[in-house]
Image: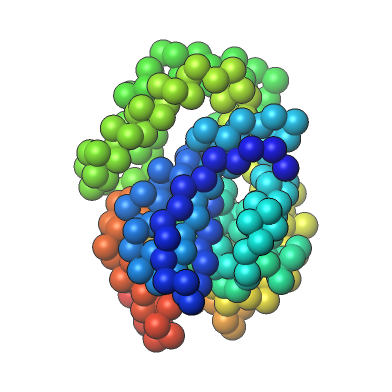
C-alpha cells in the first residue's frame, strides 16, 4: 500500500470508528477542529490521501480511483471494523465509491459538501467558471499553470485565496487553523509531486462529472445510511446535486447550513458537530435545519 500519513484521536473502545477523508487540495488538518469532538463518541482517524498532506504518491496515483484503493487498503491494514466514513468534497466522493464497492467496510457515512455526480437540473450543474477551471487544470498545460499560480501567490495568499473561494465567510475559520494550512503549503512547495498530484485528482473529478453515468450508478448502489451535510452558499459543489442524490435513498438525511460554504467543519465546527451528534443519537432533525 505504501506509507500513508494519518492522525488519530483515541476514543471510547466500544464506540464507533470514524475515518475522515479530506477533499481536493486538503489534508488531515481539515478535521483538526472536529476530530477531538468526534473522539468523544469513538476512535477517530484522519488520513492524508496519496499526493496530499504528507503522504507521497510513491508508486500510487493521486486520482479518485487510486485514492479509493488507498482508503480501502488503509481500512484493511489497520484491521478496522466497519467504520463511519466522513468525507468532504472529493473525500465524500471517495467515501461513496468505497461504500458502493465494499459495503462490508462501512457502517455509515457522513458526506460533507460531497462532490456528488453532476445533476440533471440546471441548478445541479457545476458553476461554469469552476467547470472551465477544472477543464483547464486537467489539460496538458494544467501542471504548468498550477505551478505558476502557486509560486506567484506564495503560501499565505494561496491559502487565503482558497478559503475565500471555499468558505462563505473566510474570517470564520480559526486563525490558528489558517496558519497551520499556510505552514503545510510551505512544506508542500518543497515536494516535487504536489502540483502533479493536484492535477491528477482534478482531472479524475472532471472526467467523472463530464460523463456522470457510472458515478450516478455507484451513488444509487450505496445501501448504507448517510448524513448529508451541505452549505447552501457552497460555490464549488451545488446543493441541488446533493438534494438529487439524497432523493434516491430513504436512509439518507440532508441537513442544509443556509449561511455556510464548502467547509462546514472548519467554518462552524460547533454547528457541524451538533448536526452529527443529533444523527448519531438517532434523532433525525427536520430536513434543512442545522
Q: Name the foreground residue: 79 vs 56.
A: 79
Q: Which residue is drawn at 28% across and 57% down?
A: 268
Residue 256 visible in this rendered orientation of the protein: no
Q: Is residue 130 above or below residue 254?
A: above
Evaluate whether residue 215 shows in this view: yes
Q: Where's residue 20, x and y in %?
A: 50, 55
Residue 62: percent from the left, percent from the top? 67, 36
The x, y position of residue 210, in whole percent, is 70, 45
Q: In which quarter of the image is residue 290?
A: bottom left
Say above or below: 94 vs 103: above
Quarter residue 244 falls in: bottom right
User: As rendered, which of 28 and 275 lies closer to the eye?
Assistant: 28
Q: In this view, does 124 lie to the left or right of 214?
A: left
Lateral position of residue 38 relative to residue 20, left or right: left
Q: In this view, does 16 lie above or below 46?
A: below
Q: x and y percent of residue 179 in the render?
A: 28, 32
Q: At 50% across and 63% down in the image, what residue appears?
A: 18
Image vertical order of residue 93 relative to residue 194, above or below: below
Image side of residue 243 versus residue 50, left or right:
left
Is 286 on the left or on the right of 170, as rendered?
right
The tally of labels here is: 0
- Residue in the foreground of this view, choosing between 236 and 96: 96
Q: Which colour scheme is used?
A: rainbow
Q: Residue furthest bottom?
A: 283
Tell me which residue sits at (72%, 42%) in the image. 1
Amino acid at each position: 500500500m505504501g506509507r500513508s500519513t494519518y492522525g488519530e484521536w483515541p476514543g471510547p473502545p466500544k464506540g464507533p470508528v470514524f475515518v475522515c477523508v479530506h477533499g481536493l487540495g486538503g489534508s488531515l488538518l481539515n478535521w483538526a477542529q472536529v476530530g477531538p469532538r468526534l473522539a468523544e463518541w469513538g476512535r477517530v482517524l484522519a488520513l492524508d490521501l496519496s499526493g496530499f498532506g504528507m503522504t507521497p504518491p510513491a508508486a500510487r496515483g493521486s486520482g479518485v480511483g487510486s485514492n479509493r484503493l488507498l482508503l480501502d487498503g488503509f481500512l484493511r491494514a489497520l484491521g478496522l471494523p466497519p467504520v463511519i466514513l466522513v468525507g468532504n468534497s472529493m473525500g465524500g466522493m471517495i467515501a461513496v465509491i468505497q461504500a458502493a464497492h465494499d459495503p462490508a467496510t462501512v457502517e455509515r457515512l457522513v458526506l460533507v459538501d460531497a462532490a456528488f455526480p453532476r445533476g440533471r437540473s440546471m441548478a445541479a450543474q457545476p458553476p461554469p467558471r469552476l467547470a472551465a477551471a477544472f477543464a483547464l487544470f486537467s489539460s496538458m498545460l494544467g501542471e504548468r499553470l498550477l505551478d505558476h499560480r502557486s509560486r506567484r501567490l506564495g503560501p499565505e495568499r494561496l491559502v487565503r485565496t482558497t478559503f475565500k473561494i471555499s468558505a462563505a465567510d473566510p474570517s470564520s475559520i480559526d486563525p490558528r487553523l489558517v496558519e497551520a494550512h499556510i505552514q503545510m503549503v510551505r512544506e508542500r512547495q518543497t515536494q516535487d509531486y504536489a502540483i502533479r498530484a493536484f492535477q491528477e485528482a482534478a482531472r479524475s473529478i472532471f472526467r467523472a462529472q463530464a460523463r456522470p453515468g457510472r458515478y450516478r450508478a455507484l451513488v444509487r448502489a450505496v445501501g448504507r445510511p448517510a448524513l448529508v451535510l451541505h452549505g447552501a452558499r457552497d460555490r464549488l459543489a451545488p446543493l441541488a446535486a446533493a438534494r438529487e442524490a439524497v432523493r434516491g435513498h430513504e436512509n439518507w438525511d440532508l441537513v442544509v447550513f443556509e449561511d455556510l460554504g464548502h467547509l462546514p467543519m472548519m467554518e462552524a465546527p460547533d454547528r457541524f458537530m451538533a448536526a452529527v451528534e443529533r444523527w448519531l443519537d438517532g434523532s433525525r432533525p427536520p430536513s434543512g435545519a442545522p
